[in-house]
Image: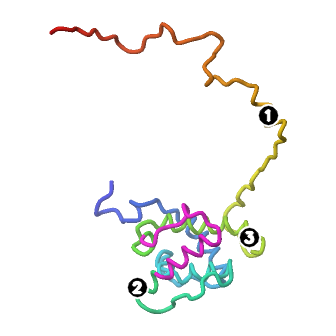
């Protein structure tokens, strides 16, 4: 039950510390830097590490990373990071909102976003670095000939209204109501 005794992160989404460690390890190996000795969510909060990650995966995708300045500059890093993710091909449904990380409302979603970036990296043949998570399945495209597509046109589906003479005649659903007129 959410209340003052439970931290906010437990309310929004269940954090998986193993996944967070895996995400942190992957980011560290991609950007070739260690996280500062502070909690995971605080290390990511200013967006600098996330922007470096995107610039490693797609060099130059973020032109200027704000490394100093107030909260506005740091929140701008998160905004640039999210735009870079979309450009890189990360589905926007997988992106966390700035407040999820900045206000620590949903750190689990931040980790999911990092895993989504890792999945997207598989689709970039130019990326030769470390991977995160399982390789996504490839599209299994099928090409049907015109004759195969036309073959189904002779089949009458049950939606057409015929079911070998069975009808719903005589069925009665629910209780019948007597309508009394003239009262």
Give the number of the disc on residue 70.
none
- Where does the magenta region start and end? 76-99
- The percent coordinates of residue 42 (x first, y second) are 46, 78
Query: Are there few (<14), some (14-19), or many (20+) residues within 10 Å of tag 1?
Result: few
- Is residue 63 on the magenta stretch? no
Label 2 element class: helix
Of the numbered discs 3 and 2, the one sitting upstream in the chain is: 2
Give the number of the disc on residue 71.
2
- The percent coordinates of residue 57 (x first, y second) are 68, 77
User: Foreground: 178 or 79?
Assistant: 178
Write down the residue under mark 3: 124
- Is residue 92 on the magenta stretch? yes
| Quadrant in which the N terminus appears | bottom left
Image height of 143 relative to 54, above or below: above
Write down the residue under mark 1: 150
Label 3 element class: loop
Labelled pair 3, 1 in contact (Cβ < 8 Å): no
Instruction: Determine the residue positioned at 60% across, 63% down.
Output: 91
Instruction: Determine the residue positioned at 62% across, 72% down.
Output: 87
Nearer to us: label 3 or label 1: 1
- The percent coordinates of residue 96 (x first, y second) are 50, 67
Image height of 176 relative to 41, above or below: above
Tell me the distance, in whole angstroms, between the alpha carbons under discs 3 and 2. Answer: 33 Å
Labelled pair 2, 1 in contact (Cβ < 8 Å): no
Return the residue found at the far front: 182
User: Foreground: 19 or 86?
Assistant: 86
User: Foreground: 129 or 181?
Assistant: 181
């Amino acid at each position: 039950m959410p209340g003052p005794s439970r931290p906010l992160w437990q309310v929004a989404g269940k954090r998986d510390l193993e996944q967070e460690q895996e995400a942190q390890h992957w980011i560290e190996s991609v950007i070739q830097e260690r996280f500062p000795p502070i909690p995971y969510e605080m290390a990511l909060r200013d967006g600098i590490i996330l922007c470096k990650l995107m610039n490693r995966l797609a060099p130059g995708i973020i032109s200027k990373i704000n490394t100093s300045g107030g909260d506005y500059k740091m929140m701008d890093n998160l905004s640039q990071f999210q735009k870079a993710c979309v450009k890189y091909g990360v589905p926007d449904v997988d992106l966390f909102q700035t407040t999820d990380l900045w206000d620590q409302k949903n750190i689990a979603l931040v980790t999911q976003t990092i895993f989504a970036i890792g999945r997207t990296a598989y689709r970039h043949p130019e990326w030769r670095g470390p991977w995160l998570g399982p390789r996504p399945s490839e599209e299994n495209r099928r090409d049907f000939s015109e004759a195969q597509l036309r073959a189904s046109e002779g089949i009458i589906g049950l939606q057409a209204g015929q079911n070998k003479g069975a009808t719903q005649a005589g069925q009665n659903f629910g209780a019948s109501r007597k309508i009394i007129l003239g009262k």
